[in-house]
Image (cartoon, helix red, strand yellow):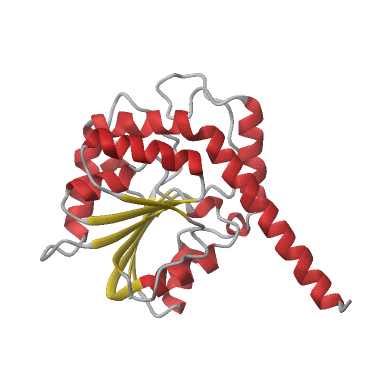
Amino acid sequence: MDSKNVWRDEALEDYTALNREIESYWDVRSSAFSKVRLRELAGPSRVAWQGFLAERLPKDRPLRVLDVGTGAGFFAILLAGMGHQVTGIDMSGDMLHEAKQNAMASGVSVKFQKMDAQVLSFADDSFDVVISRNLTWTLPDVMAAYREWQRVLKPGGVLMNFDSDYGLETFSQKEDQANVHAGIDQAMVDTCNAIKDAVRISTHRRPTWDAAYLQGLDMTVEVEADIADIVHNDPAMQYDSVPLFAILARK
């Protein structure tokens, strides 16, 4: 067999195995993660996020929105409640179960689908908005994800990504029950660190890298280096200290 084909097959096998490990990790985390997002929805962070999004989204009509890596459905629920038509996708079936339950309890209609954020099944130019929160740091191929997100956006559409530069961080157990990551056992912390260290995005400094890559896709990019003070405003919840950046890219 040609050596290039062997290398390609091995790389694909590694990529697939890492995707499965990430999916399994979030399946296990789904219930506890959902409780954190429900706390946010019940507190002042909900209003803060709604205001932040409303200021930056087109205001003239209901929007067709794709929430990538929807998790427990936080953005999907917020945006559906704001009158938009939302589709939420996630690789984790257990996360999607939580999202469906949370959306139903919130009284909003959202379409949820199990799907890889790096390989979307939607047609070109399908959405007005593609939005994601705390997902890209854990993707094996962020470049593929960004290309797909740009592809499914309509001309003039907006890509909104909220994430943190976790590449140089080492996650640890949190004892303070106010911390959003409290209660995660050491084995899961070790798995999270292993995943972080395995993905290529951890070798880049962000959001500088993200902005440059999206500009290379012919998108107009705006970056807000840290919006944590705006949206992490619930005194009853303690987040990590890594800046939460916001990227707004227009097709």
The residue sitting at 78% across, 64% down in the picture is 10
The quadrant the C terminus occupies is bottom left
Residue 204 coordinates in the image, percent (x, y):
57, 60
Q: Is residue 160 left or right of residue 163?
A: left
| Furthest residue in direction right, as rendered | 1
Q: Is residue 21 left or right of residue 88?
A: right
Asked if residue 152 is positioned above or below residue 183 in the image, the reply reads below
Asked if residue 177 is positioned above or below residue 234 in the image, the reply reads above
Residue 103 coordinates in the image, percent (x, y):
29, 39
Q: How many marks?
A: 0
Residue closest to the eye, 130 or 89: 89
Residue 129: quadrant of the picture: bottom left
Residue 158 coordinates in the image, percent (x, y):
29, 67
Residue 200 coordinates in the image, percent (x, y):
63, 59
The residue sitting at 37% across, 40% down in the picture is 99
Asked if residue 48 is positioned above or below residue 223 in the image, the reply reads above
Q: Is residue 244 left or right of residue 51?
A: right
The residue sitting at 71% across, 64% down in the picture is 12
For the question of whether residue 204 can be seen, the reply is yes
For the question of whether residue 224 can be seen, the reply is no
The quadrant the N terminus occupies is bottom right
